[in-house]
Image (cartoon, rainbow, N blue to C red):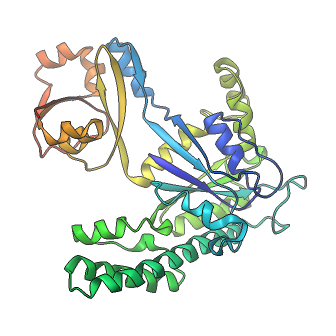
Amino acid sequence: MEAGIVGLPNVGKSTLFNALTAAGIASENYMYSTVEPNVGAVAIPDPRLATINRYIETKKIVPAMLQLVDIAGLPRGASQGEGMGNQFLAAIRNVDAILHVVRAFEDPNVLHVDDTIDPARDIDAIETELILADLQSVETMLQRAKKNARTGDHAAMLRVDILSACEARLSDAQPARGMKYDDPQAARIFRELFLLTAKRVLYVANVAESDLGGTGPLAAQVRAHAAANNSEAVAISARLEAEIAELDETDRSEMLQSVGLEEPALAVLARAAYRLLGYQSFYTAGPKEIRAWTIPIGATAPQAAGVIHSDFERGFIRVEVYSVDELVQYGSEKAIREAGKLRVEGKNYVMQDSDVCHFLFNV
């Protein structure tokens, strides 16, 4: 899973990136402190891995990973190249989701590009730039598509129809994520346009340490916008999380407890991103490793196998599966098998969250 971090300059994007990845990226109080996109991978917290390990000995534990792409602050005019905007936007065209960081704290020592704090205005500024960038991209692609469609090729003509619909929607200042296609070929063409506004957005209200619950009026603006757009919002103090990230495990737990937090921001973000994108986890477990894998909700067993390796999907025969809860209940895979609870499923099996799997395949 890959997410791109966007927002206006000086809203706390690089500070949040530092907190999540412990990468030590510069987070200075001026525009464009991030010039080249920063990329970092972080392990997604998952207590079920430790639960599995209580019953299955292994050499290593491999969690699912979240890759983050932190780009420079996007000023107004970014879609037209202002502040290297086009270059920065191109860096996040292939991500699965966008983390839109919004400043929801007052601090006279931290500059704001518009001098005042207004989350709703800031969200609108960024989303306008993403829409304009997509519109520019669609107009360019549409010109080429119309030339290709002169041959009468069905796929080329379908591409023109989809691009024309995108152009109309974007011209009306509406994001592309509201567009849906049931036809598999149309859905694939739309997906491969890699439109910024087709991606799901998780809004991150960067709050003051005095509002960690995100109940203040500034964070409320962010939550209201997210709710109105069928999205999610989380409240995080990037500065506090950056401090927590520098501590060892013992001190980190003590600091979290002292400020009334149960867990670091990464766990909150990861769960919200999973919900937003419709993802779930399944596991493979054995003496060499216990590993978490990320799949869309509704994925079939062969599709899950393909996440591990394309050969597994191509040569899929069946999967032996049980749940983490069943492992806790019976205490071992052997006991699960003896109790008749080890299920053998075929190609039509729809994976469930927390399945533990052994795939059988032949290529």
Q: Please give left or right for residue 290 compared with residue 244 in the image.
A: left
Is 139 or 274 nearer to us in this picture? 139
Q: Please give left or right for residue 110 compared with residue 255 in the image.
A: right
x then y, percent, for residue 67: 51, 43
Q: Residue at x 45, y 73 (%)?
A: 176
Q: Residue at x 81, y 69 (%)?
A: 114
Which corner quadrant of the image does residue 49 belong to?
A: top left
Examine the rendered structure and indicate whether residue 30 appears above or below residue 307.
Answer: below
x then y, percent, for residue 193: 40, 68
**Quadrant position of the N terminus in the picture:** top left
Which corner quadrant of the image does residue 253 belong to?
A: top right
Q: Is residue 272 visible?
A: yes
Q: Residue at x 28, y 35 (%)?
A: 308
Q: Please give left or right for residue 308 compared with residue 242 in the image.
A: left
Examine the rendered structure and indicate whether residue 103 appears above or below residue 212.
Answer: below
**Quadrant position of the C terminus in the picture:** top left
Q: Residue at x 74, y 38 (%)?
A: 240
Q: What residue occupies the far right of the structure in this picture?
A: 108
x then y, percent, for residue 108: 90, 56
Q: Please give left or right for residue 125 compared with residue 303 in the image.
A: right
x then y, percent, for residue 356: 26, 29
Which corner quadrant of the image does residue 20 belong to?
A: top right
Examine the rendered structure and indicate whether residue 210 appears above or below residue 201.
Answer: above
Q: Is residue 161 visible?
A: no
Is 126 or 71 nearer to us in this picture? 71
Q: How many marks?
A: 0
